[in-house]
Image: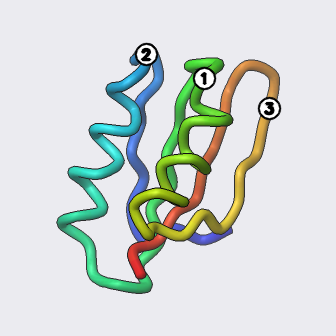
């Protein structure tokens, strides 16, 4: 998936990947795609839950070994 910006949260643990995702999304325009890279095991569940409660849109979640790639956009 093509992203407008990539945010590397590798090595960070909850809640920091979500906090940093919110900060970056706040800087972006609606419709732009943010790719978030994380290796926190909780990220796979945290990002969809955060999107559901904040109105962000989760476009995709990919897992490769212990790495996650989440693609979100601001509505």
Which residue is painted at 30% across and 62% down in the image? Answer: 25
Name the residue beneath numbered marker 3: 64
- Coloring basis for residues: rainbow
- Which is nearer the N-term, disc 3 or disc 1? 1
Q: Position of residue 69 (x, y in %)?
A: 63, 44
Q: Are marks 2 and 1 in contact (CB under 8 Å)?
A: yes
Q: Neighbour class for label 1 at 10 Å: few (<14), some, many (≥20)?
A: few
Disc 2/disc 1 C-alpha distance (Å): 8 Å
Q: Against 72, is 31 above or below?
A: below
Q: Position of residue 44 (x, y in %)?
A: 67, 35
Which residue is painted at 55% across and 44% down in the image? Answer: 47
Disc 3/disc 1 C-alpha distance (Å): 15 Å
> Which secondary structure, mark 3?
strand
Which residue is more in the foreground, 55 or 36?
55
> Which secondary structure, mark 1?
loop
Q: Against 55, is 69 above or below?
A: above
Disc 2/disc 3 C-alpha distance (Å): 18 Å
The quarter in which the C terminus is drawn is bottom left
> Which secondary structure, mark 2?
loop
Q: Neighbour class for label 2 at 10 Å: few (<14), some, many (≥20)?
A: some
Name the residue beneath numbered marker 2: 13
> In front of the other: label 3 or label 1?
1
Q: Neighbour class for label 3 at 10 Å: few (<14), some, many (≥20)?
A: few
Check residue 65 in the rendering and tell me which mark sits there, or answer none. none
The quarter in which the N terminus is drawn is bottom right
Q: Against 73, is 9 above or below?
A: above
Q: Residue 14 vs residue 37: left or right?
A: left
Name the residue beneath numbered marker 1: 42
Which residue is more in the foreground, 37 or 52?
52
Q: Are marks 2 and 3 in contact (CB under 8 Å)?
A: no
């Amino acid at each position: 998936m093509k992203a407008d910006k990539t945010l590397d949260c590798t090595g960070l643990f909850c809640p920091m990947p979500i906090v940093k995702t919110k900060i970056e999304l706040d800087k972006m325009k609606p419709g732009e795609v943010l790719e978030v890279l994380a290796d926190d095991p909780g990220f796979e569940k945290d990002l969809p839950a955060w999107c559901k409660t904040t109105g962000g849109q989760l476009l995709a979640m990919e897992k490769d070994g212990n790495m996650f790639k989440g693609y979100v956009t601001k509505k």
